[in-house]
Image (cartoon, grey):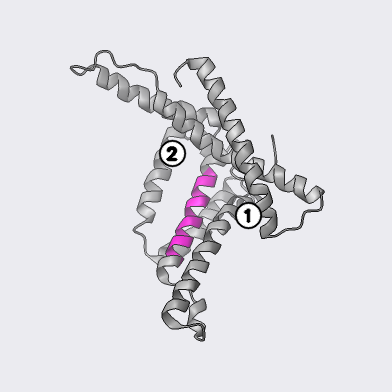
Amino acid sequence: MALNNAVFRYKPGKGFIYRIPAGLKLLILLMFTVSLMYVPLRFVWIGIPLISLLAFLLGFGFGDQKTDLKPALYYAVPLYSINIFINIFNLGIKHIEVLIPDIYYMLLALRLIVVMQASAILFRSTTSIEIKDALCGVETAVRRLLSHMPFCNSISLVPRAASVLALALNFIPEIFETWVSLDRAARARGCKVGFRKILVLLPQLISLSLHRASQKALVLESRTGEL
């Protein structure tokens, strides 16, 4: 299923970001995400336009960035709603301050947006095979190191955990592609945009995603016999 406006879909290119090893990009993303938890609010605000500019310079247009940030909206809206509910409970419904989000919830939403931006650069510039090879290479190296230790001579060098993790990571774009396909089909049948459409499509999304996941698991099992 190749949909041009699917979230986190790989986009072929020749920029320097494509020449960086996938393992290094994964490590940078992990370190960036952890360090972001300790960044003050004013610096999180700055990170959003900076990463957007970086993505634009790397060849990912504003249309791609807008598409990749859509999932953050589904998380930001519930966070804001919870914040309003807590403010009403503490201040009362007559106070206008109930609509002003707390710093804590603003940080959660902004950090989520920044992480989504950084993750989009990874998935847009890295193929699923590159991600899998990088993770499997790390686990194989660890298993090889452990095999030289006492009582670990019989340890297998097959990267089982990395294969499963790579399968899970690479399945994220496919979930969004499935949603785009269902959304297009619903619009073609005249389904109106709203919460009701989400309730109708969500069970189908879960069903199709589980079906595709089981198919991938069977393929992996037939190839490796490890699952």
Where, by quadrant of the figure, is residue 124 drawn?
Answer: top right
Q: Which residues are magenta?
A: 106-121
Per the image, label 1 sits on a secondary structure element best described as helix
Name the one closer to the observer, 22 or 158: 158
Left or right: residue 24 versus residue 81 is left
Name the residue furthest bottom: 94
Location of residue 186 with respect to 170 vertically, above or below = below
Rendered-image quadrant of the N terminus: top right
Percent coordinates x, y for residue 134 in the rendering: 44, 29
Cα separation between marks 1 and 2? 22 Å
Question: How many numbered markers are drawn?
Answer: 2
Percent coordinates x, y for residue 202 in the rendering: 63, 48
Residue type at mark 1 is Lys
Per the image, label 2 sits on a secondary structure element best described as helix
Task: Let me know if residue 55 appears in the view.
Answer: yes
Residue in view at x 59 percent, y 26 percent: 215
Name the residue furthest top: 154
Residue in view at x 61 percent, y 31 percent: 212
Task: Let me know if residue 10 appears in the view.
Answer: no
Left or right: residue 181 versus residue 145 is right
* Residue to which mark 1 is pinned: 66
Where, by quadrant of the figure, is residue 86 drawn?
Answer: bottom left
Location of residue 106 with respect to 95 vertically, above or below = above
Residue type at mark 2 is Leu
Classified by dominant secondary structure, the portion drawn in magenta counts as: helix
Location of residue 20 with respect to 158 vertically, above or below = below
Residue in view at x 70 percent, y 40 percent: 3
Name the one closer to the observer, 89 or 122: 89
* Residue to which mark 2 is pinned: 26
Residue in view at x 66 percent, y 59 percent: 195
